[in-house]
Image: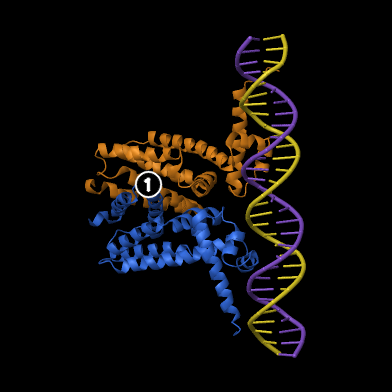
Chain colours: A orange, B blue, C purple, D yellow
Amino acid sequence: MAARRRSEMVEETRGKLIAAARRAFAAKGYAASSMDELTAEAGLTRGALYHNFGDKKGLLQAVIDQIDAEMLARMRVANEKAQTPWLGFMAENKAYIEMALEPEIQRIMLLDGPAVLGDPSQWPNQTACLRRTEDIIRGLMRDETIMPVDAEAVARLLNGAALNAALWIAASDDPQAVFEKAVEAFQTLAAGLLRVRD
Amino acid sequence: MAARRRSEMVEETRGKLIAAARRAFAAKGYAASSMDELTAEAGLTRGALYHNFGDKKGLLQAVIDQIDAEMLARMRVANEKAQTPWLGFMAENKAYIEMALEPEIQRIMLLDGPAVLGDPSQWPNQTACLRRTEDIIRGLMRDETIMPVDAEAVARLLNGAALNAALWIAASDDPQAVFEKAVEAFQTLAAGLLRVRD
DNA sequence: TCACTAACATACGCAACGTATGCTTATTGA
DNA sequence: TCAATAAGCATACGTTGCGTATGTTAGTGA
């Protein structure tokens, strides 16, 4: 039995806890998730949890950081497939709406996260998705694809619009149809950015 | 000592509990608000609470219904002062952003409410603000002030944009300056609705 | 006037978080 | 190689807070 490295074991423990937390938070919500159950499912106890993450909020923060990184990666992929910068931008936003439809992301990133940790803009990592949107907008302005605007403000607004669209779609009877409508409306609004060049 | 009517006393009790809950939820958030403290501040016990509202969520729902009605009224006032339907629409949205900046509304309506009760579209009353926005948009379409769009979708997106704008503003260092930027960006986006008529 | 019921208070059980303490095992320095 | 140390995690405990079951008082209708 080769003695394993300390850092390996820690990473494994943290990984197991984060994975179990993702499942529990997504399925039952943050408040209704018991730390006893959660850690037991990971084959551990609450001792490991409080040692590694400090408290329940700390675990949520870790889960959010992980999901956020995944979302950022998926937005990049969506952009790369597009033909023009503007279409890439639209593709990213569509991808965001699609992701926001997934129960796990919706529950953890859009509902519990902000309520428990405060506004996402205060999160260390959640800013990643947002900052990327900002960068894209700045690029479009440099290309003169869109008119000059405050990139941060527009990024924020579009992000909120997409977020709310997702909540709306998820609560509807016919998600697919409503999704189409939401994307179309999103493009209509975003056209405001293009209006002098249309 | 004139014996007071039953219904009067009940209304007073409910009013006291809702008022205390608004203060507590706004100041400490839903999760951190103790029902014992809350009811004690109202000069009552948890017995009154569970009799009148069923559980903690029920009290939050009652608080939300009350605030929602107030918000709707304020949006109406903002609209009435405007010169044209389009400006009225913009005024309502600006008013919404302003309201969403208030800590009480932000904490209860935008953060804790959705997380605890689920998406606002499922709330019995929160739909009020949203439906009003929808109606306004339909009116603007009939006037041919804006191009034909899916009113529900656009209402949702604009609502989300305004919501996120408020969270952003509140977290910023210079709320006043950021507020100006947010309103301007909001108008830029909304201009997408006007583009064929510009 | 008197049974009856609604409105609220009191008392209890239980679940869950956070901390303090204890044990086990990897790492470190001689 | 072998203590000594500390990190990593488990166990045990105290506290808080929700929800319910039960008790008590005051208004209601016949």
Image point 53% across, 59% down: which residue?
B24
Which of the pair A96/B186 is nearer the observer? B186
Q: Secondary structure at mark 1?
A: loop
B73 left or right of B7 in image: left
Name which quarter of the figure residue A17 lies in. Answer: top right
Which of the pair A142/A175 is nearer the observer? A142
Q: In the figure, B43 relative to B93: above or below?
A: below
Disc 1 crowd, CA 10 A, few/some/many (<14, 14-19, 20+): some
Q: In the figure, B149 relative to C2: above or below?
A: above
Q: Which residue bears the numbered disc 1? A: B172
State which chain disc 1 sits on. Answer: B
User: In x, y percent, where is residue A198?
Assistant: 24, 47
Image point 25% across, 43% down: which residue?
A148
Q: In the figure, B106 relative to A96: above or below?
A: below
User: In x, y percent, where is residue B51?
Assistant: 64, 68
Image point 33% across, 65% down: which residue?
B78
B66 left or right of C5 in image: left
User: In x, y percent, where is residue A97?
Assistant: 44, 46
Residue A173 visible: no
Residue B94 visible: yes
Q: In the figure, C2 relative to A95: above or below?
A: below
Could you tell me the amino acid type at mark 1? Ser
User: In x, y percent, where is residue C17?
Assistant: 62, 45
Which of the pair B60/A94 is nearer the observer? B60
